[in-house]
Amino acid sequence: MTPAAGLVMQAVGLSKRYGHIVAMEDADFELAQGEILGVVGDNGAGKSTLTKALAGALLPDAGQVYVDGEPVRFSSPLDARLAGIETVYQELALATQLDIAQNMFLGREIRKPGMLGSVLRQLDKRRMRQQAAEQFHNLGIRVQSIRQAVETLSGGQRQAVAVARAVAWGRKVVILDEPTASLGVRETRQVLDLVCRVREHGLSVVLISHSMADVLAIADRIHIHRLGRRAAIVSPKTTVMSDVVAVMTGALPPDAVVSAAFAPAGTRGSDRTLTRAATAAPRP
Amino acid sequence: MGARALLGQVMMRDRELAVATAAELASNELAVAEAGSPRRLALGLLAWPVTGPLIALIVLFAVFSLTTSTFMNARNLSLIAQQSVVIGTLALGQALVILVSGIDLSNGAIMVLGTVVAGSIASPGNVILALVLGFAACVTAASINGLLVARFRMPPFIATLGMFAIIAAAARLYSQSRSFPVTSDLLSILGSGPEFGTVTITYGTLAWVALTLVLGYALHQTAWGVRVYAIGNSPTAARLNGVNVTRVVFSVYALAGVFYAFAAWQALGRTPIADPSGYQTANLDSITAVVIGGTSLFGGRGGVAGTFIGTLIVLALKNGLTQAGIDSLYQQIGTGALVMLAVGADQYVRRGYRA
């Protein structure tokens, strides 16, 4: 198939089974350049599985992922990262005893130029701190010091560090898994503001969230996941919250809402192969 | 109270919350919460984890110099340094392992194996070869620990407990329970050094200091060091950030073997005899030194400066109590109490941070 233009990331017919349990069944996904895509779904709908497949943390049994129209195959999170896709995990993935700058550069440390770096392998701490501080400034995140240990930060600040790190390294897509799950009202608002600023930096954002209010507040489009596949993709401009919830829970058939999909939907056939062509016609 | 009144209260609170939120959004600040004084104390301790052990060492020195006449002089202090080198060098490797939330119960046995291998080959035989094979034995044994823990994901406690039994028995079988007197100058060189009157600064003491500095550099100035701390802090976080946890943990155990080998060399300098049944308590002493030095058994916190001081505390305590003519059993009680104090302090600091 030819992937639709303007989509930074697309997936067609993703499936994943664990024994008899179907975690993902013929799921489609699309993310347009520079948008915030909210992903909502009930517990157990398979949001996590979808996210992991996009982030390279899980290899789907069937289906194809495209980045900028090119087919890709992520066998590890590193592959996804090299393709410009950064993920902020629910468990935050911060080393809390290290400071902010160390966390920003963990696994991608910068060494000093010359012999100090190449022979003595000395870190360029100053440069890393400087770059981390710049990144924080650009995103409008304020902390006392870039040398503070992450454990001295509040939940919202920690989330901000994780997001800043993803933005610093992500060239195309930042995937946020429940970024506001453990936050209070004020901190949630701050993190959502931060996510909007990420979009202003030209990155595309996938926002997986339980909170319908968060998603409706900032998402450009909403991907509704149900029973292991995408039930619908809608725009918050044309679909109200109660309809999103209705589709999510199955009270309303997906056809009843206005689709905001750009790409043609994948087939729902039973002959799923790893790289099969989508045969369905574009929706009107 | 009526339901309407309750509802009114809730709405009031919501409105206050909304106002507060708006005000804070205007400043757009993720400011740090004001720290209370117990938290600030914990923060200060954490900022420099050597503080506690250093104070303990100074107090110890003060007490012994007041209560005994023979403790506080250059000769005795150089003696304490000499008594510290074996445990101190062993503890550097142990600290490294503990930093990645591990523990090595076999390091004493590995060190003894190193002395026996080197001692047996040297009597009579090529001394250089003896030294090289002694080092190789230590690094190989420690690497097996690394393989078991990093690659096969065995709990460090069990893996190294097994290795302790195996290595201790292997050293006896290999030597047929004989001990080897060491006559070679090279093998016992770390016990000698320049003399200044009655004071001797041994090469072993200098080597201990140098090894501490090198390991400190590796831990604090290289990416590898940052990753060691990150893994001890949260292996999941390290892995999600692309750190090859298996490889780093293996390297930690293998590198610890290099320090055990140096400890073996130090041991031959202290007492020039390779005895397969020697240094029975070295392992526990090394753990004691690391813990008293402020390194957290939960990993990710502490380091070599603390371990250096921790070793001095253990040995100064032994030395001082001996000078004061106190039974060695009380020395053990004192050391045991210190370990509990150190772990208690560590947990207090950690809890302070969770709050």
Image (spheres, rainbow, N blue to C red):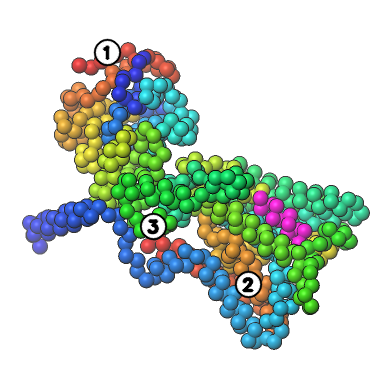
Answer left or right for B256 relative to A84. right
Do the dots labelled 2 and 1 sit on one chain?
Answer: no
- Coordinates of residue A173 in the picture (x, y in percent): 36, 34
Question: Which amino acid lies under the numbered mark 3 shown in the image of this protein?
Answer: Ser
3 vs 2, front mark: 3
Which residue corresponds to mark 1? A281
- Coordinates of residue A87 in the picture (x, y in percent): 39, 38
Magenta-span inclusion, residue B135: no
* Label at residue A145: 3
Tell me which segment is drawn in magenta. B255-267
The furthest residue to the front: A114
Disc 2 secondary structure class: helix
Question: Which amino acid lies under the numbered mark 2 shown in the image of this protein?
Answer: Ile
- Coordinates of residue A266 in the picture (x, y in percent): 32, 18
Q: Chain of mark 1?
A: A
Question: Which amino acid lies under the numbered mark 1 shown in the image of this protein?
Answer: Ala
